[in-house]
Image: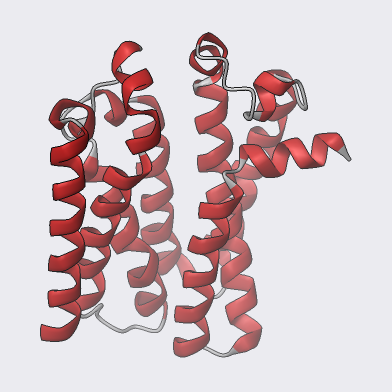
Amino acid sequence: MSKLQGLRKASHFGPTLIVTTIGWIFANYYWWEGPAYVIAFGICCGQFVVGWSNDLYDYQDDLAHQRTKKPLVAGLITPEYLRKWIYFMTPCAFLINLFGPLGIKGGLVYMLGIACGIGYNFYFKFIAASPLPYAIAFAALPSSIAISKEITPPVWMWLGGALFGMAAHFINVMKDMDQDQASGINGLPQRLGKKRSILAAVTLIALGVVVLFLF
């Protein structure tokens, strides 16, 4: 049970649940409940890969900052155990999303978002372009479902998703910003600092709301 609990925590379960729920809502709107659950399951598998790879990559940094709430640091699971699950879940996520209701086109768009999440974990979090993978991933999530029904994603969907995604990035790093800066993690929020990052997040959310109403 402790290992399952560790896997759940390493998946960043709160954000994973939110993203999966959003995906299910869009899938239920464009499809119906049956395919919507399959799409949501595929989305969840992809989010597991992103969350697990994040915790695995950050393990040494989490140890250095004594983040005992992280399951690897707490000893609930080992890096080897988590790595095995990543190797198992990655092809599962591809197969479910590419050969499920999303189809090849929609599945590839969603997996682009997953690739962006992994790219952020290993590269983008260190550079000024750190909001970019969030923008692409949050735009790809609902757009992939529209594309699966041969519908061109409307402007509000992909642009609003991109703006809210970037806002989520600024908000997400706020709690660990000082420790990130000490570790040399210098994405755009860390370069701007807390006050300007809060302003950026509020501005992006406001722009996202405007896009939803105008488009």
Q: Which residue is farthest front?
A: 195
Residue at position x 76%, y 20% in the image: 75
- x and y percent of residue 180 in the render? 35, 21
- Can you say whether 115 is above or below 25 in the image? above
- Can residue 215 be seen in the rendering of this structure? no
* Quadrant location of the N terminus in the rendered image: top right
**Residue in the foreground of this view, choosing between 106 and 193:** 193
- From this view, report whether residue 209 is shown above or below residue 162: below
- In this rendering, the count of numbered labels is 0
Q: Give the residue at the far top of this rendering.
A: 64
The quadrant the C terminus occupies is: bottom left
Q: Residue furthest right?
A: 1
Left or right, 87 with reference to 20: right
Horizontal and vertical percent for residue 3? 82, 34
Q: Is residue 51 visible?
A: yes
User: What's the residue at 63%, 30% (across, down)?
Assistant: 69
Left or right position of 81 against 24: right
Q: Is residue 119 left or right of residue 97?
A: left
Q: Position of residue 135 (x, y in %)?
A: 25, 53
Q: Nearer the viewer, residue 26 or 196?
A: 196
Residue 30 location, x and y as percent? 44, 88
Residue at 19% of width from left, 68% of height from top?
Answer: 208
Which residue corresponds to the image point at 50% horizontal and 22% vertical from the top-left?
57
Residue 128 found in image quarter: top left
Question: What's the image's color scheme?
Answer: secondary structure
Q: Is residue 150 above or below residue 90?
A: below
